[in-house]
Image: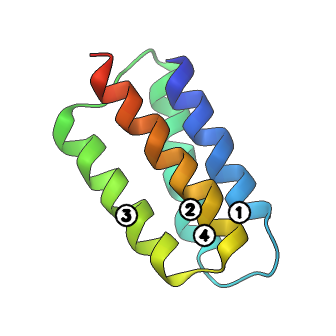
Amino acid sequence: MRTLREVNRRLIDAIEEPPETGEERRLDRLAATLWERASRGEGLDAGYRCRVRYKLRTIAETTHDARARHLEHARELLAEHAESG
């Protein structure tokens, strides 16, 4: 569950990255969901992980560079999580 906590941390970093763009609420909901799953010891099934990575990619493509870097790092962590089983 360490990876989900790391992903959550990257999402929080993205939320805190100025300027505000209106994406913060969506990212906050996603971060809260990942934190809850990590706290309960739940993993992410392949389908859910794919949907989260897609959401992060679409937001990263339309946001400013500083926030996009955090989101891309979160996507990489999710990919590593998938590869590790």
Q: Earlier in the sequence, mark 1 or mark 2?
A: 1
Alpha-carbon span between mark 1 and mark 4: 8 Å
Alpha-carbon span between mark 3 and mark 1: 14 Å
The residue that appears at 67% across and 85% down in the rendered structure is 21
The residue that appears at 46% across and 77% down in the rendered structure is 61
Q: Earlier in the sequence, mark 1 or mark 4?
A: 1
Residue type highlighted by circle 2: Leu
Q: Are marks 4 and 2 in contact (CB under 8 Å)?
A: yes
Mark nearest the camera among 1 and 4 is 1
Q: Earlier in the sequence, mark 3 or mark 1?
A: 1
Q: Which residue is mark 4?
A: 25
Q: Earlier in the sequence, mark 3 or mark 4?
A: 4
Q: Earlier in the sequence, mark 2 or mark 3?
A: 2
Query: Which color scheme does this rendered protein use?
Result: rainbow
Classify 83 as above or below 13.
above
Residue 48 in which image quadrant: top left
Residue type highlighted by circle 3: Lys
Residue 80 in which image quadrant: top left
